[in-house]
Amino acid sequence: SDHTLEYPESPQSMNWSSFYPAYVAGGAPEDSTKITKLSKDVEVVDIGCGFGGLLVALATLLPETLMLGLEIRTSVTQFVQERIWALREQSGGNLYQNAACIRANTMKFLPNFFKKAQLSKIFICFPDPHFKARKHKARIVSTTLNSEYAYALRPGGIVYTITDVEALHLWMVQHLDAHPSFVRVSNEEVEKDECVNVMQNETEEGKKVTRNKGQKFVALFRRVEDPPWE
Ligand code: SAM
């Protein structure tokens, strides 16, 4: 339950140094509990990252960008962190320094981790469908949560969604379309976006759907500028 979830009081109080030691301004501190600034902020988030396939693929595609997987299951979070540590070591410490995973319930604590307009991309890949109507409130795309995504995303930033469940795809499109902060990205642009290929083919769920010859529904939404105050 959430009793055991650790989360910072505010983005300023989050200590990222143990997650991205190579990006600690002035080198990693001796005292790992000390809050130290990174030379850049986390910019890309994978919500419900599962076993980390997307992160691992994006880490080398966007090598200058700090990315974070958020996952609610403790053992899965640990697995992803260890996967990243191993990849860092195998590359002689040169690669994968920009990826990390943290245990979090993204339905509750997103604004504790990220300040307004901090993120450039949010990935929502194959979220749990919660088929039954009384379970729809557990869906990771909703009117309330979309406002949190809009808060954390900078204007021009993108929410990436993919699912193999058509009803959930339509739900996500309906809720993001209805939100004043988001506009759908055109098919032409979707096809050109190299992250879409990663989302389709490098996520563990994406691979499973390919093996089962299932369909994948993709939709991208851009965060628009807030209207000027009147
Ligand atoms: N995105 C991965 C992929 O495409 O392979 C994993 C998809 S899996 C079907 C959904 C994941 O979301 C699970 O690992 C689950 O534990 C995680 N999850 C569900 N609710 C969550 C929440 N509120 N916060 C963070 N992670 C959550």
Image (cartoon, helix red, strand yellow):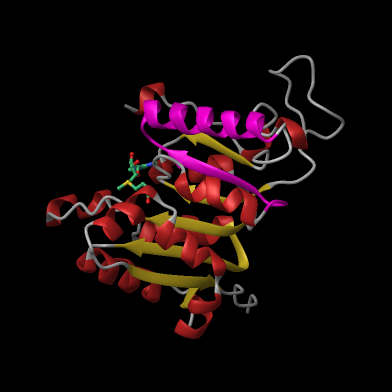
Q: Residue at x 39, y 41 (%)?
A: 50
Q: Residue at x 70, y 29 (%)?
A: 17
Q: Is residue 86 above or below residue 137?
A: above
As rendered, which of 84 and 70 lies closer to the eye?
A: 84
The location of residue 73, given as percent across then percent down, is 36, 32
**Position of residue 74 in the picture relative to residue 186 (left or right):** left
Quarter placement of the N terminus = top left
Q: Is residue 4 above or below residue 7?
A: above
Quarter placement of the C terminus = bottom right
Q: Residue furthest top?
A: 31
Q: Is residue 176 above or below residue 129?
A: below
The location of residue 129, given as percent across then percent down, is 23, 54
Range shown magenta: 63-91
The location of residue 35, given as percent across then percent down, is 73, 26
Q: Quadrant of ligand 1?
A: top left
**Position of residue 26 in the picture relative to residue 170 (left or right):** right
The answer to whether residue 15 of the structure is visible from this angle is no
The answer to whether residue 138 of the structure is visible from this angle is yes
Quarter of the rendering containing residue 216: bottom left
Q: Residue furthest right?
A: 26
Quarter of the rendering containing residue 220: bottom left
Decide whether residue 66 is among the magenta residues: yes
Q: Residue at x 49, y 60 (%)?
A: 198
Q: Residue at x 63, y 39 (%)?
A: 11
Q: How many marks?
A: 0
As rendered, which of 28 and 8 lies closer to the eye?
A: 28
Decide whether residue 186 is among the magenta residues: no
**Position of residue 164 in the picture relative to residue 14 (left or right):** left
Q: Is residue 62 above or below residue 167?
A: above
**Position of residue 119 in the picture relative to residue 69 (left or right):** right
As rendered, which of 143 and 205 lies closer to the eye?
A: 205
The location of residue 15, given as percent across then percent down, is 66, 29
